[in-house]
Image: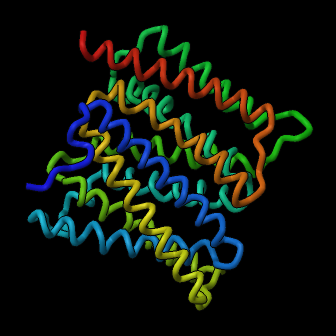
Amino acid sequence: MRISPLSGLNDNIRGSLFMVASMVGFTLEDSLIKHLTATMPLGQILMMIGLTGIVFFGLRARSQGDTLWTRSYLSKQMLWRSFFEVTGRLSYTASLMLVPLTLATAILQATPLVVVAGAAVLFGEQVGWRRWTAIFVGFLGVLVILRPGLEDFTPLSILSLIGMIGFAGRDLATRAAPPQLSNMQLGVAGFSVLSIAGIILSFTGMGMVLPSGKETLVLGSTAVCGIAAYQFLTMAMRTGEVSSVTPWRYSRLIFAAIVGFLMFGEAPDSFTILGSVMIVASGVFTLKRSAKRGKA
């Protein structure tokens, strides 16, 4: 009988460790993409990552008896999910090319706040004044990072904001997706539209290049990190209580700051740090309040 090294820990600790591992994976994926965009077209990068994801999740789907094609992919909810997936991926990945990794990651951390606000508006979920206040503070944190109107405002950082909204829309559409679709089928659908978007970009001006051996290795590593991060995220959300596990999502900021400094010589300024603190504090508060309301 094989014993997992985490088997002796309680579910909340194991779930939190899975979430931290997921955030490490996503940070490494972001940093490798940022590195690749210096020598490879964005469309080609997205196409290769998408195709790798299709193969992985397609094999996983078949292994558990799921079909690779279903008409549910054409449902209104899935079409919206695909739209937001492409919008989020394209915008956020483009922002990685143009702005510091830490800044892009910090703005991305507002995604859970947008999801809570969107669930209240679209699905009628009850959100009290305390959570609305926290959401407002989190949005202020995003504005602090963006610093519109100030001299050092970077218009290109708007791409990170659009990416964050796209990912939030994808998460909301996933909630409304046909329940018969498995997580593996959702993975196939998501990576399929990503690869299609990459192909379109490649054949509409961005072009393609023959990757070197080093670039091929980095591309493979990028795909592995992204897939592993997705898997750890799924394991985290299925282990332990959401209120204990989800706040560890914000550890991604710490890893982004470390990797950004080591790989790209970045150092977050005071606006980014202050805005990040506001987003993280409001996000953790909102998640805790949501968990308490769910238990009531």
Where residue 129 appears, as percent x and y from the top left, is 48, 8
Taking the spot 55% from the left edge, 34% from the top edge, the residue there is: 110
Q: How many marks?
A: 0
Q: Does residue 279 sit above or below 285 in this rendering?
A: below
Q: How is the image coloured?
A: rainbow
Q: Quadrant of the N terminus?
A: bottom left
Residue drawn at the location 50% of the way across and 32% of the way down: 114
In this rendering, is residue 215 above or below 31?
A: below
Which residue is nearer to you in this view: 115 or 231?
231
Counting from the top left corner in percent of width and height, residue 267 is at: 78, 45
- Report the side of 196 relative to 6 (left or right): right
Q: Quadrant of residue 11?
A: top left
- Residue at 65% across, 48% down: 258
Q: Which one is nearer the viewer's eye here, 177 or 258? A: 258
Q: Quadrant of residue 42?
A: bottom right
Residue at 55% across, 37% down: 109
Specify whether 77 is left or right of 48: left
Instruction: Indicate the quadrant containing the C terminus: top left, top right, bottom left or bottom right.
Output: top left
**Residue 106, position in %: x, y?**
63, 39
Give the side of residue 55 with respect to residue 277, left or right.
Answer: left
Residue 293, given in percent of the width and then of the height, sits at 31, 13
Q: Is residue 154 left or right of residue 101?
A: right
